[in-house]
Amino acid sequence: MEKARLVLAMVLAVIVIFVYQIMYAPAPVKEEKSETAVTQSDSPAPSTAAAAPQTVPDAGALPVAAPGTEKDIIIDTPLYEAVFTTKGAALRSFKLKDFRTSLDPDSELVELVHTIPGNPLPFSLTFIDSTIPVALEGFYHTDSSSLTLNEADQPKELVFTQTHGGIRIEKIFTFDPAKYTIQLDVNVKNLSSSTIQQNAALTWFQYDDPFFNRKSGWWANFSGEAFSHDGPIHFATGSVLMTNLEKMKAMEHFGPNISWAGYESKYFIAAMIPQRPALTTLSIGRDDNHLVSVQMNGPKNLIPTNETGVFSYTLYMGPKDYSIMKALDLNLENAINFGSWLKWLAIPLLIALKFIFQYVGNYGIAIIILTILIKIIFWPLSNKSYKSMKSMRDLQPKMMEIREKYQDDKQRLNQEIWNLYKSNKVNPMAGCLPMLIQLPVFIGLYKVFLCAIELRHSPFFFWILDLSAKDPYYITPLIMGASTYIQFKMTPMTDPMQQKIMLFMPVVFTLIFLNFPSGLVIYWLFNNILSIAQQYYVNKKQ
């Protein structure tokens, strides 16, 4: 019985994760060929049809763009290198200096802009439902040719201007060398002789590459391979909504009360945060040529003659790092998919892991230390469980006698077994419940190891070079399986069926853990080792 409850507790842990992945994991998404699905350099050559100019969703009838000369402006900061263009005063490239597409130190920097020739670029600006419409890709003027910001520099501005159809537009980007956020202020001055109404629409455009392989099926969800979401995401009225591009059939509209919106991959996000979310709506669409638009609309401004209307946004382009995003106080940290029902546990575990890392400098060691601390916290419960299992084992001979004596009277059999438990002060559930209580911790850590960018490309020792990825040689899962077998073997069973389960379950656990993040396997392995030591101690002491 005691072994059956141990097996039950561990099987329940797997079932909980399995069911959670099946029910709550996002729909199939693009495989990240080099750790980010938005890396421009990873894309194959687009087809001729895909390279054709795209229709801008929900942009309304726009005038012909004013002529001009296209020029690139390079922004160089300690955190990123960005390239803006005078065509639309839009963003052509945004590379993160601290993140590469693979473990190779010479691999490409992570690129957040994914586009093809002929497509409009991110942060393009138009005016829908406005008195004076403005072409999406009209040319702007700027006096800047480049901006370089060092760590000690104050924020610097890049100003684009365009005069068109009775208004003068200024797009002012303000860069802070110490932040992934960029301030965008759009000033619209009314040069006409009457009051006008302007409604700005700021759009992030993304090419949804149809050539990426897409993984699907229960195993992809269960192993975490398809767990990350790649596509539009927004936060409104306290909830996060991720758009499934595969299921989109038409333009989708949301709002008002849009706190932020953007485009995400597993570890990175480009987000637009409006100054007035209560008056902001959102339109998300994808056309036949795989152009995705995340368009932030409003608010509407009434601008008298010679007055200026202002539209302000905060732009975030960077890692989905909980500490960085939380410090912004913009609710952006909700983009990290820790899960709704165990988020309260996953976040403290991540904070604890990062705290330990400050002192040891290796997340693998930090995981082992965290495992020890968790084991200490649950030590009394585990002791109670092991003692109960030992007591149950000691009662096995008497239980076998009762079963033989009352095998034809089930009611009397159950009553006598209960009397045996009661007379020996044994609680049959005491061996199971403490283990079930620990399941949320395991699942919380599972979410942390899947989502935390801190573990991306973070090495442990020897062959484990990325704690967020599976063990490439499957060594740690095999050792973990062996430790599970030892843990099961430490409590010999007289029931042949339970003995078969004892031999079978370590194999099942090993197969399941093969594709889990190596950080999670290390946690479970050392938890097993500590549990074996604790169980040995309890058995010897009693």
Image (spheres, grey):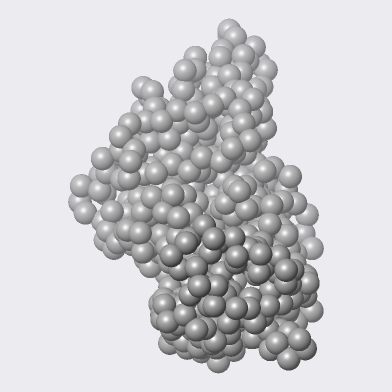
Q: Answer with left or right where residue 450 lies relative to residue 437.
A: left
Q: Answer with left or right where residue 332 lies relative to residue 287.
A: right
39 or 158: nearer the viewer:
39
Above or below — where is 393 with respect to 60? below
Identity of the residue drawn at 78% across and 72% down? 380
253 or 525: nearer the viewer:
525
Identity of the residue drawn at 59% across and 37% down? 239
The image shows residue 183 at horizontal and vertical percentages of: 67, 43
Quadrant housing residue 308: top right
Quadrant housing residue 10: bottom right
Q: Answer with left or right where residue 24 lies relative to residue 447.
A: left
The image shows residue 503 at horizontal and vertical percentages of: 43, 83
From where the camera sits, is residue 137 visible?
A: no
Q: Which residue in the rendered view is the most extreme toward the top?
A: 194
From where the camera sits, is residue 369 visible?
A: yes
301 or 382: nearer the viewer:
382
The image shows residue 524 at horizontal and vertical percentages of: 59, 77
Identity of the residue drawn at 38% across and 67% down? 33
Q: Which residue in the rendered view is the most extreme toward the left?
A: 48
The image shows residue 514 at horizontal and vertical percentages of: 43, 77
